[in-house]
Image (cartoon, grey):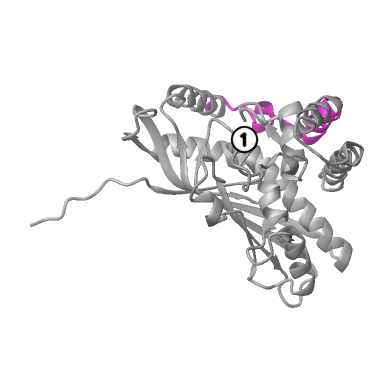
Amino acid sequence: MATKERKMPPILSVSGESLPEAWENACIELADKGMVYSRRDPEDNKAQVEAYMTIEVRNPDADPFSHLKGGTNALDAPLLDYYLEIMGSKNTWVRDFNNPEDTRWDYMYHERLSEYPDQKNPDRKIDQVKFAIDRLIESPCSRRTNIITWYPERDMLASHTPCLQRIWFQIIAPQGEEDWALDMHYNFRSRNVMDASFGNMHGLYMLGCHVRDGVEKATGKSLAMRMIDNIDSFHVNSRSYARFIHIVQGLEEAKRAGESLSERCWNRKEVVDGLKVAREEVIGATLKQTRQHFPGDMAAEEKRVNDIADRVFYLLDKYAPK
């Protein structure tokens, strides 16, 4: 008797030179080839689309830099807020898990990556970002430069768990060649295309630039960079599915009409100019919420957040296309 073939989300893969090109290609590929179905979920049970997706960004430094349809974190205050968050501006917002009355956030990506809990010593935190930089300096071609966010003791019980699971780095430095490159792979368990998927790519780019800069300063090497985004569930939920299809149809029509990618995007200078205007607003909003629960030195915290902003703008300038 023939075995019934089970319908499963397809395995899809796209590539693009820049962040916007790669993201746009992923959206079109998902709309064209993703599995459309209704989930057994009382809150999300109508038509939606899903696939396993791999997105290669061959040169994330390249222009264009942000996409007009990139969603919530594509420009100005939301993008700067996310840059600062993934570089550590909101680490103090994570709740005390020993206090059942603490209702703050269950995690921040940077908090998990730079302050991972040490099971043997609760007073010690593990800085995985520093580990990655140090490992790449000491052993550039190592395949063991891997950092994680998942913390079972918390995440098996938490209401909100990290979508980003791990990041892997390797320096590609073939013998006899002077050019070195940072290869950065990262894995998400789940990404809703219509929410923060493009912003996630920008945030991980910023973290990759931070790592790259640390290695360059120690080694004297200039590193190109590639990003590979692996997503277990690259999807659009039922609430956003119709809007997603409408956006993709618009992208396909623009391409058929001969519109260039740059006409659907912003270049880095336009993005950075908007971030500069938004800086005071974003830092003010972050510190306002921090004051509600932070018991420490607010003057020192304000300096720390401003230092992070300085770092973000330094990296944006350093890796701008020449």
Question: In the depicted view, which residue is nearer to us: 129 or 11?
Answer: 129
Quarter of the figure with residue 94: top right
Instruction: Give the residues drawn in magenta, as a range.
Output: 256-279
For the image, the number of numbered tags is 1
Please give the residue where the numbered disc 1 appears in the rendered image. Answer: 103
Residue 174 in magenta?
no
Relative horizontal placement of residue 46, taking residue 210 as reference (left or right): left
Residue 260 in magenta?
yes
Residue 230 visible in image: no
Where is the N terminus found, in terms of image quarters? bottom left
Residue at 72% x, 63% y: name it.
132
The location of residue 113, given as percent across then percent down, is 68, 54
Q: Is residue 107 above or below residue 186?
A: above
Residue at 62% x, 30% y: name it.
70
Quarter of the figure with residue 20: top right
Residue at 39% x, 40% y: name it.
33
The location of residue 30, given as percent across then percent down, is 45, 38
Residue 40 visible in image: yes
